[in-house]
């Protein structure tokens, strides 16, 4: 009788050990699978938005992150500051900037990053039209630079009446992210009307204040 009891105890103990080993093995397998998924995900390059539709489909949190990335790259380029300093001032991590703005950065031999002279990142900007400022998406810092110069000339005209700089933009245009060309208006009566309505007075050409 005692022998049978001992056998049952040993059998139960053996089953418990086997079950524990199986759980341990399953846990290790699950951990390996999770690590493999993370490793694979880290190798997948993120795809920044290239059109207004792609940008609009993103959640609000991403849009805020994207605008900070744009601001950081712009600060690095115009103020000649480091990625670390620029990202600190815009409230974003350098890693996030490298992740989403990689195409706008170049890595120096010493391991630090600098902004390239230009980039093709998507930006939402405001452009004057006969009906008032219109929000459009453009790709590239060169487009933004041209638009910024136009806005400066327009504001100078509205403030001083001197249209000399504004007239240099006659025949020039901005191409949006969909390839549509939008002329830069030098129609003085129309611009005067918009200026009198107060719709051309703001501090940034960016639609979201990047």
Image (cartoon, rainbow, N blue to C red):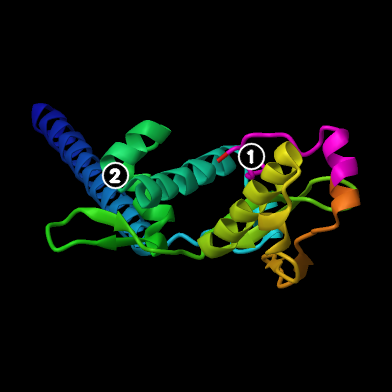
The quarter of the image holding the C terminus is: top right
Q: Quadrant of residue 184?
A: bottom right
Callout 2 environment at 10 Å: few (<14), some (14 to 19), or many (20+)? some
In-image side of 143 versus 24 (left or right): right
Residue 114: x %, y % from top left: 29, 56
- The disc label shown at residue 102, or none: none
The quarter of the image holding the N terminus is: top left
- Labels 1 & 2 near each other (Cβ < 8 A): no
Residue 45: x %, y % from top left: 41, 63
Find numbered disc 1 in the image and state the secondary structure of the residue it sits on.
loop
Main SS of the magenta part reads loop
Find numbered disc 2 in the image and state the secondary structure of the residue it sits on.
loop
Camera-side mark, 1 or 2: 2
In-image side of 73 versus 9 (left or right): right
Callout 1 environment at 10 Å: few (<14), some (14 to 19), or many (20+)? some
Cα distance, mark 1 to mark 2? Answer: 23 Å
Name the residue rendered at 84%, 48% in the picture.
191
Name the residue rendered at 52%, 46% in the picture.
66
The residue that mark 2 highlights is: 81
Q: Nearer the viewer, residue 21 or 63?
A: 63
The residue that mark 1 highlights is: 208
Q: Is residue 35 visible?
A: yes
Q: Nearer the viewer, residue 91 or 203?
A: 203
Q: Is residue 193 in the magenta section?
A: yes
Q: Nearer the viewer, residue 18 or 182?
A: 182
Name the residue rendered at 37%, 32% in the picture.
89
Residue range in magenta is 192-209
Name the residue rendered at 29%, 63% in the picture.
106
Residue 110: x %, y % from top left: 12, 58
Q: Is residue 160 in the magenta section?
A: no
Q: Quadrant of residue 53?
A: bottom right
| Mark before the other along the chain sequence, 1 or 2 | 2
């Amino acid at each position: 009788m005692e022998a049978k009891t001992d056998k049952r105890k040993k059998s139960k103990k053996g089953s418990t050990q086997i079950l524990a080993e199986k759980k341990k093995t399953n846990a290790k397998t699950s951990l390996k699978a999770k690590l493999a998924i993370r490793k694979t995900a880290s190798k997948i390059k993120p795809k920044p938005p290239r059109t207004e539709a792609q940008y609009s489909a993103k959640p609000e949190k991403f849009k805020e992150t994207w605008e900070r990335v744009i601001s950081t790259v712009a600060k690095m380029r115009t103020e000649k500051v480091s990625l670390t300093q620029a990202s600190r001032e815009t409230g974003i991590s350098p890693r996030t900037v490298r992740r989403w703005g990689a195409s706008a950065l170049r890595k120096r031999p010493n391991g630090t990053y600098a902004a390239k002279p230009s980039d093709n990142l998507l930006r939402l900007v405001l452009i004057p039209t006969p009906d008032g400022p219109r929000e459009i998406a453009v790709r590239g810092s060169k487009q933004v630079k041209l638009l910024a110069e136009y806005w400066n000339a327009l504001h100078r005209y509205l403030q001083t009446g001197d249209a000399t700089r504004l007239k240099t933009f006659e025949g020039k245009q901005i191409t949006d992210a969909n390839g549509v060309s939008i002329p830069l208006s030098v129609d003085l009566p129309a611009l005067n009307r918009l200026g009198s309505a107060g719709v051309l007075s703001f501090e940034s050409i960016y639609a979201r204040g990047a």
